[in-house]
Each structure stands twice: as C-alpha cells, then as structure tokens.
Image (cartoon, grey):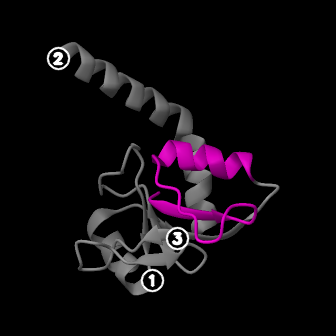
Amino acid sequence: MGHDHRFGQEEPGLRFASSAPSRLRRLALNLDRGAKVIYAADYGAAADLKPLVDVQQATYLIGSDIKGVMTRQSKVAFASRQTAQDMLAGHGGQLGDFDAALRAAYASMADDTIMIRQRRAEKRQSS
C-alpha cells in the first residue's frame, strides 16, 4: 500500500521503508501501540515522485485493473476523491477508505505472500 508508518514508541520522524507485506505485518503487530499517522503515495498526482497523503484523508481505489505493488489486488490511494472516481470509471474496482483497503490487504496477504515467493523462486531458477 506504499505507506509510511510512524508509531508512538519510535524515534520522532522515523520512517520505515520496507515491502508492503512487511509493513502490513508491522501494523498488525503494533496495533496496541497505535500509529500516530500513516501516509500513502497520492497515485493521482502527476509528479514522478508522488506526494504523501494521510491515509485517513485518502480515498482508495480497490481491486481495479491498475497493477498492484507486490499484490494481485491493487489498493491505490488518492488525495482527491474526484480523481479516484475518475480512475474508477476507467479502471473498475470500488472506492473505499483506509479501513476498506486494510481489510482487502489482510484478506489477500496469504495469496500475495505465495505469489512473491513463487516469483523469487522463478528468478533464482532463471539466473
């Protein structure tokens, strides 16, 4: 989901850069600590380097034909609800908030992990 997590017990301003499944596990394991804020890249921004949007303010396009990052089911964040609706019209899926995207991520985590492991094995065999 391309997020930046900031947990209350960590150093101020510490950013975690890791894969989506590992960030999801970290979020699940730290539920009792509670994130101060989580950011996602704004897929609707024109810039190559996407600005960050607070996930609580973002609108997600879930399950569209937009290729997911390390996941079969895409969950793409937009700062603008209108931009998300425009992308929905062209790419399918459904709109939701962060909780809906998180539910989708948890539901598909096992399949995504299997897919990642298979791709890594294929790369090792072709090398």
Per the rendered image, the range of residues in magenta is: 1-30
Q: Position of residue 107 (x, y in %)?
A: 59, 43
Q: Quadrant of residue 97?
A: bottom right
| Residue type indicated by callout 1 | Arg
- Which residue is the extreme one toward the right? 32
Whichever of callouts 2 and 3 sits on the residue coming sooner in the sequence is 3
Q: Element type at marker 1?
A: helix
In this rendering, the answer to whether 67 lies above or below 6 is above
Q: Position of residue 79 (x, y in %)?
A: 44, 81
Residue nearest the viewer, comparing 60 with 25 = 25
**Mark whose residue sits in front, 2 or 1:** 2
| Residue type indicated by callout 3 | Tyr
In this rendering, the answer to whether 83 lies above or below 38 is below
- Mark 1 Cα within 10 Å, few/some/many (few <14, many 20+)? some
Q: Element type at marker 3?
A: strand
Left or right of 26: which side holds 126? Answer: left
Q: Element type at marker 2?
A: helix
**Mark whose residue sits in front, 1 or 3:** 3
In this rendering, the answer to whether 82 lies above or below 17 is below
Residue at image location 46% in from the left, 36% down from the top: 112
Left or right of 14: which side holds 119? Answer: left
Left or right of 13: which side holds 93? Answer: left
Q: Is residue 121 magenta?
A: no
In this figure, which residue is indicated by the disc labeled 2? Answer: 126
Whichever of callouts 2 and 1 sits on the residue coming sooner in the sequence is 1
Q: Position of residue 36 (x, y in %)?
A: 69, 71
Residue nearest the viewer, comparing 121 with 15 = 15
Instruction: For marks 1 and 3, give the CA distance.
Output: 16 Å
Residue at image location 39% in from the left, 74% down from the top: 42
